[in-house]
Structures are given as structure tokens and as C-alpha cells.
Image (cartoon, coloured by chain):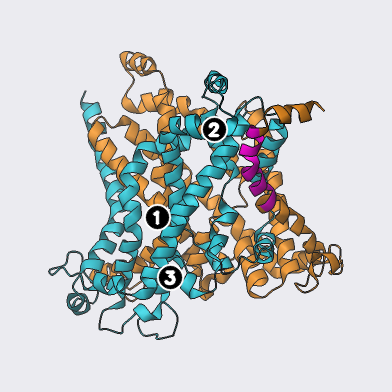
Chain colours: A cyan, B orange
């Protein structure tokens, strides 16, 4: 069994290296953000383990109005947006999973086609503009409320709920809306939690739609502000919302930038353990096929 | 009539799906109507109804434009490099994880390598700059420390595509293993037992048992990936792009964004987007047909 042992050792070694390669950039971001600014400057950024830890960069980031505001916008998106997305997607998916629905086939074709063909950026932009949603935070929620992909994933989940359940509830005098909210939804909470977490991450990471639809820097979600902070060079002092963050104090730009990255990532790291339980479910749940 | 009585009987069921149906009609199908402006000289003041028709003029302009060759080539190269170098990675790592007998350690590695999937491209491009910038990046600091010249990673057209590929591998390899691990979990353990009794080494077991066991999933995913060849992770490209690498970085969406949103050439850029979507649609349908010919399930 010598050959097996060697195999195991090599396998463990390579996987460990893969893990470390994945972790190193994150570790480095973390370390830089906590490095004492004076030390960072003295070592010219060559810090793999700080001698002196410091919260200065965090204090500065977290006391910056634009950062707080952008975090608020993204929190709104990730909460309100997620709830609305779940509602719209789950109700449609549930309906499509019921064989009683007469227009089921054409509706499914309608949803499927949106997964195969998209008219592109400009027609979407024109629609949002014509709805007067430019510079409106709802432009980051309404156009992405649902997607064919999630509808079909949820549908295949609801497919597993037997019709006998709703028939019994109908005898008790519930209508379909009542059945959905009082019986089906409570039964589906674990699945809803999984889908909700995926939606929440999507909203939290909203970037390009905000590039398209939000010009007003007071309404920027976090990712846009973050991007502006990240590309700001330490010497520039333009009056953008992000410049406010930079170098009014003697803090080196890098530690500030990385503190901003860490703060923006923290919510994802916090829900990560929750997410993890549902990974397989989210990826594997059924195929699109009827 | 039958449909109507059906609707009357299940009226609340129809009310339940109404918001979703409205969403799809308004935000997915109304924009499809907007495609007509690619055959017009659309001006925002005249709107879709009164803008003059120009037929295929914008498409002719596009095909004559030297930029067209560039964005088409860049899209293809970025996609093909992704398929060539990223696509096998999750399969390899999943095979290795599947062989890992320390179950706890396996879970630790999985937790670590799934994580980057959830980070936004803004954060990943930010980290890339932190690591690779020529003046302050830690990688260049290390290079200099070991006596090498600092290397230009970020504004170097010669390695832009490779840079994108490495980013994609770092971000998505771990996440990509999930589907293969699930497929491997479905392989009958007796097959491995039998192979072991026949004296097959671990590598031979992988080759003769595990790989054939996930063959279907691999083929299906590969074909579907080929079907979406026109789609590059364009937030990634958009964020990594700079003036030094435009010629190798520009893809359909970045081109549409620049010409349409920033310069207001709505009709022309809608035509560009439409061209991309139509080719994309043809590729998906073709890929799906191909999948079915291989006896796989396909997307629909």
C-alpha cells in the first residue's frame, strides 16, 4: 500500500497549496488593512505580518459619511430587494409548478426564452430611463427582481410538493394565495433561505447596473464607491465622493483602501457559514428541463 | 373558452403569478421591442415612434468598422482561453478532493476555495491591483527582493488575457467543483471496490471509474459553455480595462457601453448588442442540439 500513501501525501500537499493560494490574497488584504500606517510607510508596503496592529484605517473609513451612506444603500438593496425578489420569483415558480395552471406551457416558454436571448444593454437602459428610474435606487432592484434561472430552480423545488397538500387546504376553505403564504411558504423556508442568501449576495455585489443607472454620488451603492476609492491615487484630490476618503490625514492610501475592502466583505463573510449549508442545493436543484 | 373557465376556477392561482408575469413582460420583453431602434436613427427627443428608419445601415457600419474585428476577436479569445484553462480546473480539483480521505480537512479546503465566488469583481480587481501593481504591489516587491526587474502586469497588453484567465481560475475553480463532486458522490462505490480487488491503483481507479462516472456532466457543461461563448465576464473586463490594454480588452458590452451610454449613439450600439445576442442565441441552440446528439439532457 506504499503507492497509496504516496498518492495521499501528494494529494494533500497539492490541495493545501491550492487552499493557500486562494487564501493568500485575502490574508494580505486583511493584514494591510490592519497595519499601522507609520509602519506601512516605513516598510514601503512590504508587510507580510505587521509588527504593530492598528485600527486607524478602519476608524477613518467608518467615520466617512459617503462610506456610511453607500453601505446604507447596499443594505437596503440586500434586504428589500431580496424580499421582493423572493416573493416575485417564488409566486411565479409555484404557479408554474402546479399542473392546474392552464397557461403553464406558454409561460414557461416565455421565461425560458429570456434565458436564451437578451436584447442588450441599450434597450434595458432606455426602458429604465423611460420609467424615470435613472438616479433612483429602485433601478437597482426592479430590473433584476427575478431571472429565468431562479424561476426554474425554484419551480423544480416546488414540483416536489405534492398536490394533495393544497387539495386538503382547499377543503379547509383556503384559496391559492392563502395556501401559498400559509402552507407552502412555511414549508419551503430552508429553500427560501438558500435562494434569499444568493439573492442578497447578488444585490450586495451590484455594480454595473449602478454604473448605468446611478450618476448621483449620494445614491451610490457600496461597490461603486469602493471602486472609486480603489482607483483613486493617493495624490489626487478631486472632489468626487471618494476623494473625501483619501489622504486628508496622513494615512497611506493602501491601508485605507484595504480597510474599505474588508468592511465591504464582512457581511458576506458573516453569512458565509449560513450560505455554505445550502451550496449544493442552490447549484444542484433540478435542471431546467420539464 | 376552456382556458377562461380554467382561469375562473383557479383565479387566485393566476393572481399569485401575476407580479412575476408582469415583471417578465415589462423588464424582459418590453426591451425586446426596443431592438427596433437598431434599424432607426433613434433620437431620444423623437422617441421610437418618430425616429427615421435606416434599415441595416448600422450593421453595415459595424461590419466595416475595424473595431468590430477587435471586439469579436477579444470576446472569442477570452472565452476560449476560459474554456481551455479554467474549465478543466474544477474537474481536477474535484477529483483530488474526492480522493481526500481526511473528511474534516476536505471540508476545510472546500470552505476556503468556495469563498472567492462570493466576492464582487470590484473587490477582486482591487485585490489584483494591490498584489500586482508595479510600484507598490507585493508580488513586484518580492521580485525586486530576489533581484529581478519589476514586471508590468496591469498595463501590459501582452498578458491581459492571461491575467483575466488567472482571475477567473482563482475566483471560480472552487465553486465549480460542487457540481462534479455531486456527480462523483453518485458513483456506485462497488465499482471502486471491484477495481481495487482487481489491483487497480488509485490513479487507474480515477481514470477507469471516477472519470467515466462524471463523463455526462462534463460533456453537458462543456457544450453549454460553448453555447455561451459570446458571454465573457464583462464586469471583470470592464474593471480590469485601462487605456493601455483597450485593443485586447474591448468586448461587446464594453464597446456598447462606451458608444451607447457614454457617447449617446443609441441606435448603433443597440445594433452591436443585437448582433452579439443573435450570434449568442444561435450558439446556444446549436450547443443544445449537439448535447442532445451526444445523448445528454441539454438546457431545455
Residue A173 vs residue B50, the one in the foreground: A173
**Which residue is rendered at x = 53% and y = 23% of the image?**
A169
**Residue at the limit of the structure toward the left, as seen here:** A51
**Which residue is rendered at x = 33% and y = 76% of the image?**
B135
Q: Position of residue B219 (x, y in %)?
A: 55, 33
Mark 3 is surrounded, within 10 Å at the Cα level, by few (under 14), some (14 to 19) or many (20 or more) other residues, namely many
Q: Position of residue B182 (x, y in %)?
A: 42, 30
Residue B18 is one of the magenta-drawn residues: yes
Residue wearing tag 1: B119
For the N terminus of chain B, the quadrant is: top right
Q: How many marks?
A: 3
Residue wearing tag 2: A178
Judged from the image, the secondary structure of the residue bearing numbered disc 1 is loop
SS majority, magenta: helix
B99 vs B246, left or right, is left
- Alpha carbons under labels 2 and 1: distance apart: 38 Å
In which quarter of the view is residue B107 placed? top left
Relative to B208, is A251 above or below?
A: below
Residue wearing tag 3: A225
Judged from the image, the secondary structure of the residue bearing numbered disc 3 is helix
Q: Position of residue B177 (x, y in %)?
A: 41, 39
Name the mark nearer the viewer: 2 or 1.
2
Which residues are the magenta region?
B12-26
Name the mark nearer the viewer: 1 or 3.
3
Mark 2 is surrounded, within 10 Å at the Cα level, by few (under 14), some (14 to 19) or many (20 or more) other residues, namely some
Q: Position of residue B56 (x, y in %)?
A: 84, 62
- Alpha carbons under labels 1 and 3: distance apart: 16 Å
Name the chain under label 2.
A
**Which residue is rendered at x = 48% and y = 44% of the image?**
B87
Residue A150 visible, this orientation: no
B158 vs A143, left or right, is left
Amino acid at each position: 500500500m506504499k503507492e497509496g500513501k504516496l498518492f495521499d501525501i501528494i494529494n494533500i500537499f497539492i490541495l493545501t497549496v491550492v487552499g493557500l493560494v486562494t487564501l493568500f490574497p485575502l490574508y494580505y488584504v486583511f493584514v494591510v488593512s490592519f497595519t499601522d500606517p507609520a509602519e506601512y510607510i516605513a516598510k514601503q508596503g512590504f508587510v507580510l505580518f505587521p509588527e504593530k496592529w492598528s485600527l486607524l484605517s478602519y476608524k477613518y473609513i467608518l467615520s466617512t459619511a459617503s462610506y456610511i451612506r453607500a453601505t446604507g444603500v447596499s443594505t437596503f438593496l440586500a434586504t428589500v430587494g431580496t424580499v421582493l425578489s423572493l416573493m416575485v420569483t417564488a409566486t411565479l415558480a409555484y404557479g408554474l409548478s402546479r399542473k392546474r395552471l392552464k397557461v403553464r406551457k406558454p409561460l414557461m416558454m416565455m421565461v425560458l426564452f429570456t434565458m436564451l436571448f437578451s436584447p442588450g444593454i441599450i434597450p434595458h437602459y432606455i426602458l429604465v430611463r423611460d420609467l424615470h428610474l435613472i438616479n433612483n435606487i429602485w433601478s437597482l432592484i426592479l430590473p433584476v427582481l427575478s431571472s429565468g434561472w431562479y424561476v426554474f430552480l425554484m419551480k423544480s423545488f416546488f414540483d416536489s410538493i405534492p398536490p394533495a397538500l393544497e387539495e386538503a387546504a382547499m377543503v379547509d376553505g383556503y384559496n391559492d394565495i392563502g395556501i401559498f403564504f400559509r402552507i407552502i411558504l412555511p414549508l419551503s423556508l430552508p429553500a427560501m433561505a438558500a435562494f434569499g442568501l444568493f439573492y442578497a449576495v447578488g444585490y450586495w455585489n451590484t455594480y454595473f447596473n449602478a454604473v448605468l443607472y446611478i450618476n448621483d454620488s449620494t445614491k451610490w451603492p457600496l461597490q461603486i464607491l469602493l471602486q472609486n476609492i480603489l482607483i483613486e491615487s493617493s495624490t489626487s484630490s478631486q472632489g468626487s465622493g471618494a476623494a473625501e476618503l483619501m489622504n486628508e490625514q496622513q494615512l497611506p492610501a493602501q491601508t485605507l483602501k484595504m480597510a474599505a475592502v474588508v468592511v465591504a466583505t464582512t457581511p458576506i463573510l458573516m453569512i458565509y457559514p449560513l450560505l455554505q449549508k445550502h451550496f449544493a442545493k442552490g447549484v444542484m436543484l433540478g435542471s431546467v428541463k420539464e | 373558452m376552456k382556458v377562461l373557465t380554467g382561469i375562473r376556477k383557479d383565479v387566485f392561482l393566476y393572481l399569485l403569478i401575476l407580479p412575476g408575469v408582469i415583471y417578465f413582460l415589462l423588464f424582459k420583453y418590453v426591451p425586446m421591442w426596443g431592438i427596433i431602434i437598431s434599424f432607426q436613427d433613434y433620437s431620444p427627443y423623437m422617441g421610437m415612434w418618430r425616429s427615421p428608419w435606416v434599415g441595416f445601415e448600422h450593421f453595415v457600419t459595424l461590419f466595416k468598422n475595424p473595431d468590430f474585428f477587435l471586439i469579436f476577436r477579444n470576446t472569442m479569445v477570452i472565452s476560449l482561453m476560459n474554456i481551455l484553462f479554467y474549465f478543466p480546473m474544477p474537474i481536477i480539483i474535484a477529483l483530488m478532493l474526492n480522493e481526500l480521505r481526511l473528511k474534516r480537512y476536505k471540508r476545510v479546503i472546500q470552505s476556503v476555495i468556495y469563498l472567492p465566488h462570493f466576492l464582487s469583481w470590484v473587490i477582486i480587481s482591487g485585490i489584483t491591483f494591490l498584489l500586482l501593481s508595479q510600484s507598490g504591489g507585493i508580488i513586484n516587491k518580492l521580485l525586486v527582493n530576489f533581484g529581478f526587474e519589476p514586471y508590468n502586469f496591469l498595463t501590459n497588453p501582452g498578458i491581459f488575457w492571461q491575467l483575466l484567465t488567472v482571475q477567473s481560475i482563482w475566483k471560480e475553480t472552487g465553486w465549480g467543483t460542487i457540481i462534479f463532486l455531486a456527480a462523483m458522490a453518485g458513483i456506485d462505490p462497488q465499482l471502486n471496490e471491484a477495481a481495487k480487488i482487481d489491483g487497480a491503483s488509485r490513479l487507474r481507479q480515477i481514470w477507469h471509474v471516477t472519470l467515466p462516472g462524471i463523463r455526462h456532466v462534463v460533456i453537458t457543461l462543456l457544450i453549454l459553455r460553448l453555447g455561451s461563448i459570446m458571454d465573457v465576464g464583462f464586469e471583470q473586463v470592464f474593471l480590469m480595462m485601462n487605456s493601455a490594454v483597450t485593443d485586447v480588452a474591448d468586448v461587446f458590452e464594453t464597446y456598447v457601453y462606451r458608444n451607447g451610454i457614454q457617447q449617446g449613439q443609441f441606435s448603433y450600439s443597440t445594433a452591436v448588442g443585437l448582433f452579439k445576442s443573435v450570434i449568442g442565441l444561435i450558439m446556444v441552440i446549436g450547443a443544445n442540439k449537439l448535447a442532445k446528439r451526444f445523448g445528454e439532457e441539454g438546457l431545455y
